[in-house]
Image (cartoon, rainbow, N blue to C red):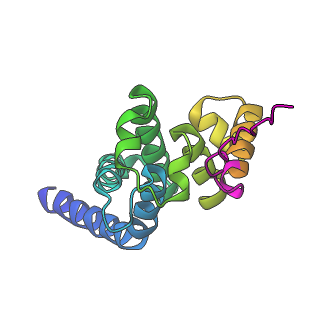
Amino acid sequence: MRQRQVSQGTRRTREFEAFVAGASGRLLHTATLLTAEAPDDNPRARRLLTLALAHTYACWDRLRGEDPYNRARQYLALRFAHGAWRRHGILFRNRADPTSPLSRLAPRERLILVLRLYEGVAEEQAAALLNLPTERVRTICDRATATLLQPPRGPAPAVVKAKVAAS
């Protein structure tokens, strides 16, 4: 009995290691997009990834045919959403890479845009995951896409007052 448990634990560990080897790069990229950090300086994204992988490992035996990547991505998104919305984006905006176009988006816009466009999650699935109406997810995604496609406006031109000649 003891040898059987050890064997199952070893198999579980190997399966999880194989999953991490294949999925961690993409999940880290997703987390980096969510946090809008620079790819080479992304401590919050790495923390999100670590938490998502730890959660996935903890429920590995209960997946029962469910896609572990989907489970990890869901946890990553929910963890980001909880932290971003709870803090109202204050901490997330401070570490965002100013050169990243995604830093111009609010955390919720970034989350929905990354889920929909980068991860390919359907509107209905994103809405269910975030507990939002499907129409709201569509609206937020459209607004975020428009924000990214329109270059930021520069400063307004200075108003020059014309001198009126006295007649």
Viewer-side residue, 77 vs 62: 77
Q: Position of residue 126 (x, y in %)?
A: 63, 42
- Quadrant containing the C terminus is top right
- Can you give x and y, in whole percent of width and height, for residue 145 in the image? 70, 51
In this view, 85 is above or below 72: above
**53 or 64, nearer to the observer:** 53
* x then y, percent, for residue 125: 66, 43
Residue 103 point in image, percent of width and height: 50, 50
In the figure, 150 relative to 132: above or below?
below
Magenta span dominant secondary structure: loop
Residue at the spot x=69%, y=41% of the render? 159
| Quadrant of residue 87 within the rendered picture | top left
Which one is nearer the viewer's eye here, 15 or 85?
A: 85
Name the residue furthest front.
167
View extreme (right): residue: 167
In the foreground, 64 or 128: 128
**Res. 107 in view:** yes
Q: Residue at x 74, y 34 (%)?
A: 134
What is the quadrant of the N terminus in the image?
bottom left
Task: Please say whether residue 163 is one of the residues in the magenta stretch.
Answer: yes
Question: Which residues lie in the magenta part?
Answer: 147-167
Q: Is residue 154 magenta?
A: yes
| Residue at x-position 47% and y-position 51% | 34
Asked if one can make out residue 66 in the rendered structure from this viewpoint, the answer is no
